[in-house]
């Protein structure tokens, strides 16, 4: 296992188009997180899954955003009707169970950089 | 909102120790202090974490004050590759990132 994988690395899209990003976590990790990061800011939490269940969503996650993790393995983040303000780095992370989290932390992917033109 | 306060930026000479401070005066008894760093264009990388005791691993040392209201991350011999943004996080379930400290290691 080579860590958390995110695809694509870069995406340029026109305003109003839909985009989808994929995250493949570390296989034995049952928790998966999505974050968004804009230039000069720290990552902002968007949502997280435990197995296939989406347990928390930030108020930052507008109705245009949807995330899924259908079989508790990979996850997708879709943005509908993209706006220029959606331009950011979208980061995915995974972690083991809650009790192990205190010992191992999160493992992040390298992110998908979205540019909306 | 993040529960930590860090300086915006710091410089360190290559080969010297880098000491990065963090204030977390409202930390509660069961919250851990985590440190991550983010090198340009990469995702954050876990460095170290602790609860009460000082901790050391192959990357860094973490010194937590007795009252747990502040901590210091120590990179004992900083290299140019340690140039990054360093985030101090008090964990309350999910990780909440603040602005971090931009550390520049200079030759």
Image (cartoon, coloured by chain):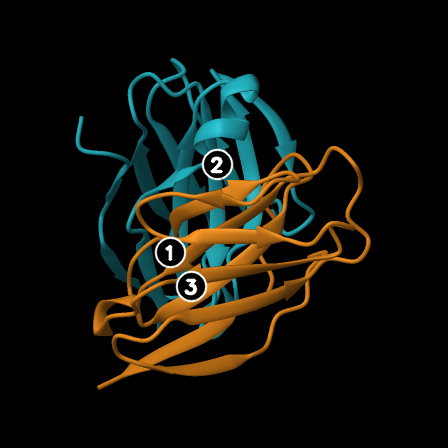
- At 56% from the left and 57% from the top, the residue drawn is B88
Q: Colour of chain B?
A: orange
Q: Which residue is mark 3?
A: A88
Question: Which one is nearer the viewer's eye here, B57 or B36?
Answer: B57
The location of residue B22, given as percent across then percent down, is 63, 64
Chain letter behind tag 3: A
The location of residue A91, given as percent across then percent down, is 40, 49
- Asked whether the residues under marks 3 and 1 belong to the same chain, the reply is yes
Q: Which residue is mark 1?
A: A17
For label 2, the SS is strand
- Asked whether the residues under marks 1 and 2 belong to the same chain, the reply is yes
The location of residue B57, given as percent across then percent down, is 37, 43
- Quadrant of the image containing the C terminus of chain A: bottom left
The label nearer to you, 1 versus 2, is 2
Q: Is residue A54 left or right of residue B93?
A: left
Residue A26, quarter of the rendered image: top left
The label nearer to you, 3 versus 1, is 3
Question: Which one is nearer the viewer's eye here, A10 or B101?
Answer: B101
Residue A13, quarter of the rendered image: bottom left
Q: Is residue A101 left or right of residue A62?
A: left
Above or below residue A77? Residue A53 is: above
Above or below residue A25? Residue B96 is: below
Q: Colour of chain A?
A: cyan
Q: Which residue is mark 2?
A: A33
Q: CA distance from mark 3 to mark 1?
A: 15 Å
Q: Earlier in the sequence, mark 2 or mark 3?
A: 2
For label 1, the SS is loop
């Amino acid at each position: 296992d080579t860590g958390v994988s995110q695809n694509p690395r870069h995406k340029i899209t026109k305003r109003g188009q839909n985009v989808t990003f994929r995250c493949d976590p570390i296989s034995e990790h049952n928790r998966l997180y999505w974050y968004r990061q804009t230039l000069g800011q720290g990552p902002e939490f968007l949502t997280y899954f435990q197995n296939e269940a989406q347990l928390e969503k930030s108020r930052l996650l507008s109705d245009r955003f949807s995330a899924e993790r259908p079989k508790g393995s990979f996850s997708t983040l879709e943005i509908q009707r993209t706006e220029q303000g959606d331009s950011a780095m979208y980061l995915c992370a995974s972690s083991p169970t809650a009790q192990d989290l205190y010992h191992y932390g999160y493992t992040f992917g390298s992110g998908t950089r979205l540019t909306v033109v | 909102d993040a529960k930590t306060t860090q300086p915006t930026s710091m410089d360190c000479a290559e080969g010297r120790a880098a000491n990065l401070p963090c204030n977390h005066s409202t930390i509660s008894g069961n919250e851990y202090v985590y440190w991550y760093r983010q090198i340009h264009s990469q995702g954050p990388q876990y460095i170290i974490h602790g609860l009460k005791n000082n901790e050391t691993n192959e990357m860094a040392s973490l010194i937590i004050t007795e009252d747990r209201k502040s901590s210091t991350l120590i990179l004992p011999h900083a290299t140019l590759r340690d140039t990054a943004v360093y985030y101090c996080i008090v964990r309350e379930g999910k990780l909440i990132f603040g602005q971090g400290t931009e550390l520049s290691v200079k030759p």
